[in-house]
Image (cartoon, helix red, strand yellow):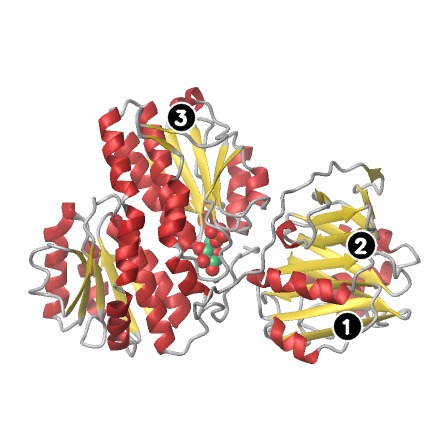
Amino acid sequence: MCGIFGYIGARDPLEICLSGLEQLEYRGYDSTGIAGVGNGEIKFCKKAGKLSNLLQAMNLRNLESAIGHTRWATHGPVNDQNAHPHLDAANSMAIIHNGIIENHHVLRMDLIASGVLFTSDTDTEVIVQLVAKFYAGDLAAALQKALSLVQGIYAIALIHKNHPGQIIAAAKECPLAIGVDPTTKESFISSDPNTFLSSNLDICFLHDGEIAIIQRGHVHVFNTKHEIIRKKTERLELQYTVPSKDGFAHFLLKEIYEQPNTVYKAILGRFQEQTGNVEFESLGFTDEQLSSYKKVCILACGGSAHAGSIGAAYLEELAHIPSQCEIASEARYRSLLLTPDTLVIAISQSGETADTIAALRIAKAAGCKILAICNVKHSTITREADAVIYLKAGAEISVCSTKALTSQIAVLALFALHMARLRGLPVEVAQTFFNNLKQIPDQINQVLLAAPKLQALAEKYAHYEDFFFIGRLYMYTTSLEGALKLKEISYVNANGCPAGELKHGPIALINANFPVVAFCANEQTKDKILSNLAEVKARGAPVLAFAPVGMDGVQAIADDIFWLPPTTDMLAPFTSTVAAQLLAYYIALKRHCNIDQPRNLAKSVTVE
Ligand code: G6P
């Protein structure tokens, strides 16, 4: 699971590839590497660790073309040997790969039996060794033959010292965009077209089994029969701006602080106050279509699945339509019994999460229409869905997602309202809901203004190694998200748990070193959560409560309370989540963790 980039043209390929890799680090940062052809030989440099390590070791010069890779390790530990690119034994070609080769072991054994020496533990090296075996002057044909033996998924770029003016690319179930500028005679490839540093490109995406020969300013694409095919190209609106922390210590903190604005942008112009109707720009589903659905199935992973669970609850509570949120990595292997009368919603910040894409394809094959809720334009999910609602949250750089989640919840709230209006929700009820939603940006701001209080709480709780995060209904999902944020960036054991389930097992773990963070904002279950808090308090747990101003009873039980602006039960996830994000941030800060790029994680998980 990785990012791949390549450039061939008049500018310095090394410089362009390094800039591309900087933007692709969200796909993994276990190692990085670059290879190019220069003076008739393959030159390469690769290093374990982040791009900064590669930059320190960089010794390449005068390349005619270059390919670059940023890795999230799947096969083989994180070290220099397993970093991409991988070369054949004669050092005549170099390959980079995103994906997984499932039958790599069998192929490796065959190659070893025929005398090939491997230098890495990766599945990728098998491909380059196979290409070397089949190469007889036609690099694309050799790659095609090698890929015919391979089972798995891939996006690949390959260069050869005898073909200095070419990059060969191939893809199967992994994104690979090719951008060509015939005027400047430049060509790019990337796992993500948003990383192209030029806005003047004709762009196409490689489909399964296609192989491309990329040269300066033009590209030839072949199908599996090695016949040349004409690809449809498009001009994409790409507006790259260099990410900036804008004075914040970390991207994560900056993105937390952006939320009053990003939530505002997610709802801006999408609700007609007079009529009580929701209007998404070019939604792509007619009112008749939406009215005809009997069920909604939401597919997502990670934080997006938490937003999805809240969205499913909104759809049930507002629109009275049976709705479920399924974790995509599970859903893809289950019998979901999807039928075309179910609307499928795929939620993903990046639009590139492999499991969400796979589940979406299964839903499509079952005849369902797909609505995507995404942040990143031109991503795979936005291209494969029937319609898209964009979050408009701006680039999210920190691996740990914050602003995307609150924007997802805002969009889901509006979508549920839309479905509800189509099913007869009275205008006044819609208006009241929206009026409460409109206040959320300001209420998030109030939480941000109280950040010093959260920092003080974080300092008090930062030394604990285990936490329960508990809540009921909307606050249960919020507790899952709060726990996920804490474990992602602080590496402490934090578990989200429905408050009512504690007594069925988890409570056995409670002692004075096991704090319980309780989200108390749901009015409907206020008394129940207070009973649960009393139960853990009685067993010695330190209790930190996030409670709405004015909540009675909590002071008598909790050791510490962070007061939140009161809102409705349905909208309480916004402010509670932001408070949990800040708590996690300050605990991670106190524990000296790598906040923007936590160990072992990647922003976009492009393998299953
Ligand atoms: C990764 C990220 C998470 C994110 C999840 C889903 O695990 O580290 O922060 O929630 O992927 O990503 P998506 O882009 O599909 O929302």
Number of the label disc, if any, that sits on residue 293: 3
Inspect the image, locate mark 3, and give the three-letter code of the amino acid beneath it: Tyr
Inspect the image, locate mark 2, and give the three-letter code of the amino acid beneath it: Ile
Horizontally, residue 469 falls left or right of residue 346, namely left
Along the line of sight, the residue nearer the viewer: 15 or 24? 15
**Horizontal and vertical percent position of residue 371:** 48, 35
Horizontally, residue 454 falls left or right of residue 121, namely left
Is the residue marked 1 within 8 Å of ligand 1, measured from its CB? no
Residue at coordinates 37% horizontally, 74% vertically from top-left? 589
Residue at coordinates 74% horizontally, 36% vertically from top-left? 232
Number of the label disc, if any, that sits on residue 44: 1
Real-space Cα separation, disc 3 to disc 2, in angstroms: 45 Å
Task: Tell me: residue 298, above or below residue 395.
Answer: above
Q: Secondary structure at mark 1?
A: strand
The answer to whether residue 107 is visible is no
- Label 2: which residue? 168
Q: Secondary structure at mark 2?
A: strand
**Horizontal and vertical percent position of residue 494:** 32, 67
- Tag nearer the camera, 1 or 3: 1
**Horizontal and vertical percent position of residue 309:** 34, 45
* Residue density around tag 3, few if under 14, some if 14–19, many if 20 or more, within 10 Å: some
Inspect the image, locate mark 1, and give the three-letter code of the amino acid beneath it: Phe
User: Residue extending furthest front?
Assistant: 247
- First of labels 3, 2 by sequence position: 2
